[in-house]
Image (cartoon, rainbow, N blue to C red):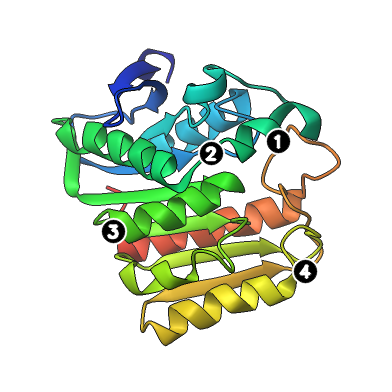
Amino acid sequence: MADRTGWVNLDVDDGSQMRAFVARPDGAGPHPGMLVIQEALGVNTQLRGVCERYAEIGFVAIAPDMFHRTSAGFETDKFETDKFMPLIRALTIDGMIADVRAAYAWLTSQPDVDRSRVAAVGFCMGGRATYLANSELPLTAAISYYGGSIAPNLLDRAAKLHGPHLFIWGGQDKGIPPEQHRAVADAVRAAGKSFIDVEFSDANHGFFNDQVADRYDADAAAESWALVTSFLDRTVGRR
């Protein structure tokens, strides 16, 4: 995969520039596309590895640097809230939408991407950005891992969701309590949108990240990956 990965620079419609990591599968395509939206730790080695995992199953994957306005290139493998919380607080809804729109525009301009088959996956703040992306862009499918702050402020966007949405939560996540999971599911159900809502009862926030030892849950990560690939086979088609 080494010769099929690298960085690109994207123009964002607010006048800023944003770096993004790209991983491509073997073969000429056209391939489906995948937006991979970071969690608080940045587009770090773990997230770049996630992009490569999606490339291995047939997607052209792009991970935009969502912190580019305040700390371009920020990445860490440590869960140090004092380092990344100021960056998260600086994010705005308009800025996140502009960033995912720029990444989507890049994907759909690529000759090896089938623009009718573009999905998104995101983690934590990226789960929220994925929900925003599905409400703003004609995505074929979307996957939000423990997306914070969807409830209550973004529930009105449920009616705008385009593709089927898979919501994945950790039952031990103190920052996103069960009533918020239910509020999201209730809003999407009331809007008549297609969705799957899954909670791993013993898993914490960030359970998919194998670089954060005190949060990683190997069983939940493996089971969620199996669910994600099945969901993508049904909604997008991987090849």
Among the two numbered marks 3 and 2 on one chain, the one whose residue lies closer to the N terminus: 2
Residue 232 position in % (x across, y down): 38, 58
Decide: marks 3, 1 in contact (CB < 8 A)?
Answer: no
Where does label 4 land, which residue? 201
Return the residue at label 1: 85
Q: Mark 3 sits on what residue?
A: 140
User: What's under tag 1, amino acid-wise?
Assistant: Met
Circles 4 and 2: CB atoms closer than 8 Å: no
In the figure, residue 171 lies in which quadrant?
A: bottom right
Callout 3 amino acid: Thr
Q: Quadrant of residue 43?
A: top right
Q: Tell whether label 4 touches label 1 (CB within 8 Å).
A: no
CB-based contact (under 8 Å), mark 1 and mark 2: no
Task: Point out the tag, 1 or 4, that comes first from the N-terminus.
Answer: 1
**The image quarter in which residue 46 lies:** top right
213 in relation to 42, above or below: below
Residue located 52% across and 53% down the image: 128
Dots 3, 4 in contact, CB < 8 A: no
State whether residue 80 appears in this view.
no
The residue shown at (74%, 55%) is: 219
Asked if residue 136 can be seen in this view, the reply is: yes
Say what amino acid the circle numbered 4 marks. Answer: Ser
Which element carries disc 4, helix, strand or loop?
A: loop
Mark 1 to mark 2 CA distance (whole Å): 10 Å
Q: CA distance from mark 3 to mark 4?
A: 28 Å
In percent of the image, x 48 and y 23: which residue is there?
68
Mark 1 or mark 2, earlier in chain = 1
**Mark in the foreground, 1 or 4:** 1
Mark 3 and mark 4 lie on one chain; the one further toward the N terminus is: 3
> Taking 176 as reference, is 212 above or below it?
above
- Mark 2, other Cα within 10 Å: few <14 / some 14–19 / many ≥20: some
